[in-house]
Image: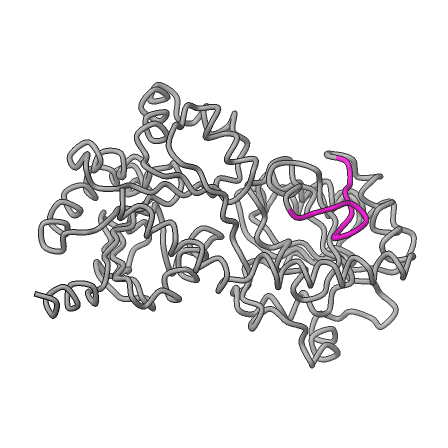
Amino acid sequence: MVIGMEEELKKDKKALIFSTAYFPLVGGAEIAVDEITKRLPDWQFDLITAKIKPGLSKFEKHNNVNIYRVGLGGKFDKILLPFLGLFKAKRLDKKNQYDLTWSIMASFGGFLGLFFKYLNPKKPWLLTLQEGDPLEYILKRVGIFRSLFYQIFRKADYIQPISRFLADWAKKIGANCPIKIIPNGVDVGDFKTSSDKETIRKGLNINPSEKVIITISRLVKKNGISDLIKAGQYLDFPFKILIIGQGKGEEKLKKLIKELGLESKVLPLGHIEHKKLPNYLSVSDVFVRPSLSEGLGNVFLEAMAVEVPIIGTPVGGIIDFLEDGQTGIFCRVRDSEDIAKKIEKLLSDNNLRERIIENGKKLVRTVYSWPNISLRMKEVFKELTLL
């Protein structure tokens, strides 16, 4: 009898994840799932996602996650995910008898989690909130399905937002389950200063006298990239602004750069692999993202890990880690002149700069490291399985 109990305890726990997108389609949420799951070898993770892109296989394994893709490989796969994914989830659960389900964001993966919960009311369901878009925009997109959208929050057994801002949102919508804030993190082993800065600068044609301002983000309105570009008009020292990322606003931003005559100063570099970002951060003197809204902002933390001082706006989850004058500097929202002033301040005050760099590096290593966050998530999984 005792031997049988010991064998039972040794069995891996099983979780079924619902995510709108997943590797090789990468954003902050996908990176978070990967970083957490690969550090929990005593759990088995299966994940159902929309195919979205042609050529992706219906099944593959990525680190510690078995990925099951549904759909035809087009943009409408997201819309079909709650329905096609439900059939796949039922089959997988019948085979594997999962200990819990886990939805990544209250999006299409959230609806899939809700539908599965309707069919399996006793199976614990975890909802992670990673949303970065303005909440008004999210509700507008939900449209006539708003009441069903609210049910995602009200039916979840446990909610894990990545910031206080998102925790407050969940409560406002009507969540009455346990809520525990566990942020995203940084792989401090990968995000560190490069030893080959000069080669990188030369490759980007950056002169030794030029200061480098960098931003990394989706090129969409909510990230305020146009405000950073406009700030270039007010800087009166040699500089380069590096813009890394893609998005639907890309052409408008390129047009703005040309209109302002900043083609030689502002460099849109497009998409760059996540693992290569430390190289670009290493040659930068300041990171700026003047967001209009933000769930948390992983890239701020990554910049801090690479010892690049940050400038951001006091919105959303940014206020969780940015203490003005201590771990970064706040600039005003939609104010290009103020952005320029804050850049100049950070570059001209060495004591301020060094304090921000040191405090930021310490904060990331003590609070925002993935091993720490993974252990906290493991405790959440444990709590859920005991419900």
Most prominent secondary structure in the magenta stretch? loop
Q: How far across and how far down the image is residue 34, in percent?
A: 40, 61
Across the whole image, how many numbered discs are drawn on residues?
A: 0
Tell me: residue 71, above or below residue 3: above
Residue at 26% from the left image edge and 53% from the top image edge:
15
Tell me: residue 32, above or below residue 168: below
Q: Is residue 330 magenta?
A: yes
Residue at 72% from the left image edge and 65% from the top image edge:
307
Asked if residue 154 lies left or right of residue 81, the reply is: right
Q: Provide the residue span drawn in magenta.
A: 321-332
189 or 71: nearer the eye?
A: 189
Where's the C terminus, which quadrant?
A: top left
Q: Which of the 4 quarters of the picture holds residue 82? A: top left
Q: How is the image coloured?
A: one colour
Q: How far across and how far down the image is residue 241, in percent?
A: 74, 56
Q: How far across and how far down the image is residue 66, in percent?
A: 25, 62
